Image (spheres, rainbow, N blue to C red):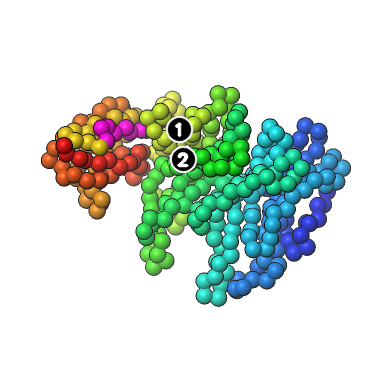
Amino acid sequence: KRWVFPSPDPYCTYKVPSDLYLLPNGHFLISAFVFGPCSVYYPPSDSCRARTWIFEADSLGNILHQYLSSAPDRYVMAAKLTLSRDGGIVFSGKETFIGQSNSYVVFRDRQYIGKLDSNYELAWEYTSKEPHLGYLSRSVEMADGSIWVCGKDKDRRGDTIEYRGILLKFSSDGDSIGRQKFYRLSYPYHSSLTDLWYDQASHFFQDMVMLPDSSLVLVGEIAVDYLSSPTAGYWGWVVHTDKYGCVESEGCFPVGLAQSPIPPWEAVRVAWCKVYPNPAHDYLTFDYQIPSQAVGQAVMIVSDPMGKEVKRMTLAELKGQLLWDTRSLPEGLYYYSLLFGKEQLASGSLSVVHQ
């Protein structure tokens, strides 16, 4: 059978299906982007819009219920669907606002998630406050009605940008109650168009499932160097967290596929680091675990706020401790990074306060 579903918005002549569910009653739940043409010059015409269209169709192709996001001042492109236990529908993706740069249109993306009630009315929605923050992808519902959703996060630090996998948690009422960020490679790149982009790494999650013990498995991709380079590549990325979104009880650090080939019989170990006491007075202890292929090559580097390296220690064991005498170190804030080649396995901050 072939069905044609006309767009409910006359300006949105282009339709891109994005998710599909087979409901217990034999009906289909479909989400799609519907959008219209948009001039590159500002201000755009009324036909410049993009909306999320979610509808339920029966086995004959008849539309029974539907929802269409508002327009035209905001573009809601939220395609991934999750059915909730109360009969509602959670949909997630991104919301795009139109801005102006000289006389041209500038699109600013924000993370977006919303929920429809059982009558296909909007129950709540959430949009990240800052622009250029990537998008949200698949969501899952926990037993208490709270919602985990994964996706991509973009963080600007001065003249550098970092793209990281993101895991957000929301209450059943749509309140934001948690955030975890995941990354395997820490290659920021200069955002200035006058600079060449070297070693840029983009981390993102596209899908996830919840296991019977309420832990989460997320899948995505790491893309390194979009420009032609000997180091360019794409890696599949798998993360298994506990029900709190953490990989290790010692902290939420990422786990995934390493860059270098690993023998099929060797499991990829979780890398983590715990620092105590923090603040430190006379000494500092680094508890750590690293992948077996990193033994003897991974290093712990401590730097001051200006980026000057003040300590470097090589990790000679798979799992162990490093003890550091901090009595001669000036008081203040410092940053540590656990590195294996160009991979950042763990990082954080610490402070030194002498009594």
Residue 351 is situated, as x and y percent measured from the top left of the image, at 25, 41
Q: Earlier in the sequence, mark 2 or mark 1?
A: 2
Callouts 2 and 1 close, C-beta under 8 Å: yes
Evaluate whether residue 264 shows in this view. Answer: yes
Name the residue carrying label 1.
246
Q: Which residues are magenta?
A: 270-278
Q: Is residue 117 above or below residue 217?
A: below
Image location (x, y in percent) of residue 348 = 33, 41
Q: Which residue sits at x=33%, y=41%?
A: 347
Left of 326 or right of it: where is 167?
Answer: right
Q: Amino acid at mark 1?
A: Cys
Q: Is residue 309 rendered to the left or right of residue 200?
A: left
Foreground residue among 162 and 285: 285
Would residue 49 be found to the left or right of residue 4 on screen? left
- The x, y position of residue 323, in whole percent, is 20, 31
Badge 2 marks a residue whose secondary structure is: strand
Residue at 70%, 39% (x, y): give it.
Answer: 88
Q: Residue at x 83, y 47 (%)?
A: 63
Q: Position of residue 61 (x, y in %)?
A: 84, 45
Q: Is residue 183 magenta?
A: no
Q: Residues within 10 Å of mark 2 (few under 14, many from 20)?
A: some
Mark 1 is surrounded, within 10 Å at the Cα level, by few (under 14), some (14 to 19) or many (20 or more) other residues, namely many
| Residue at the spot of label 2 | 180
